[in-house]
């Protein structure tokens, strides 16, 4: 059997655990094996194939892995859920004070409470959502 087939089998063999475990490092080894398979298919010797495998894998581990790690640790650019409601503008539906009230936020009726004690917001007035505590929006 040709050398390139062995390298291709190695690439597939490394790709299967990648899918099962979601370890991106295995993808880097699989790509290195694919590069070695290409080298073998182009007529490169066994030593050159191995060097290409090592060089491609190490290059990815050194350059690609840190970038991927940084990207995975960043917060998503799009806020969703409760985080998306913080800072939104709402319209008072029922009088809102320190004890409670109702607002219309993103088309839904929410219970609300004034953030500042003694502050009162009347129906029709626009307020800003500062924080969400459970199912209650704190507004100013």
Image (cartoon, rainbow, N blue to C red):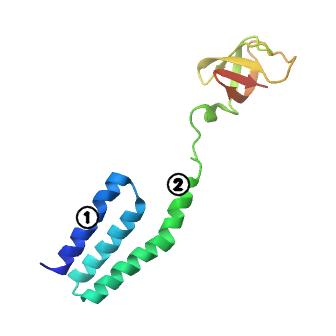
Above or below 29: residue 75: above
Left or right, residue 93 beside residue 53: right
Residue on which disc 2 sits: 72
Q: Nearer the viewer, residue 122 or 55?
A: 55
Left or right, residue 78 beside residue 31: right
x and y percentages locating residue 43 in the rendered image: 21, 87
Residue sitting at x 40%, y 80%:
55
Q: Quadrant of the N terminus?
A: bottom left
Residue sitting at x 29%, y 89%:
47
Question: Badge 1: few (under 14), some or many (20 or more) residues near its Cα, within 10 Å?
Answer: some
Q: Nearer the viewer, residue 111 or 125?
A: 111
x and y percentages locating residue 29 in the rendered image: 36, 69
Quadrant location of residue 140? top right
What secondary structure is marked by label 2? helix
x and y percentages locating residue 125 in the rendered image: 76, 18
Residue sitting at x 39%, y 77%:
56
Q: Nearer the viewer, residue 130 or 19?
A: 19
Question: Badge 2: few (under 14), some or many (20 or more) residues near its Cα, within 10 Å?
Answer: few
Which residue occupies the extreme left position in the image? Answer: 1
For residue 22, which numbered disc appears in the image?
A: none
Q: Which circle, 2 or 1, is nearer the viewer?
A: 1
x and y percentages locating residue 54 in the rendered image: 38, 79
Quadrant location of residue 2? bottom left
Above or below 133: residue 74: below
Residue sitting at x 50%, y 61%:
68
What secondary structure is marked by label 1? helix
Alpha carbons under labels 2 and 1: distance apart: 25 Å
For residue 13, which numbered disc appears in the image?
A: 1
Q: Name which of mark 2 and mark 1 comes first in the sequence.
A: 1
């Amino acid at each position: 059997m040709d050398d390139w087939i062995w390298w291709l089998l190695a690439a597939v063999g490394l790709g299967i655990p990648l899918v099962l475990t979601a370890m991106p490092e295995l993808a880097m080894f699989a790509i290195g094996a694919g590069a070695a398979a290409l080298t073998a298919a182009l007529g490169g010797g066994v030593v050159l194939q191995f060097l290409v495998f090592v060089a491609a894998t190490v290059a990815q581990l050194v350059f690609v892995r840190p970038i991927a790690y940084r990207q995975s640790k960043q917060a998503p650019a799009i806020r969703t859920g409760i985080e998306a409601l913080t800072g939104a503008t709402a319209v008072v539906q029922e009088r809102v004070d320190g004890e409670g009230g109702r607002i219309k936020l993103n088309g839904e009726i929410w219970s609300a409470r004034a953030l500042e004690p003694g502050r009162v917001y009347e129906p029709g007035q626009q307020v800003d959502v500062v924080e969400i505590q459970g199912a209650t929006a704190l507004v100013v």
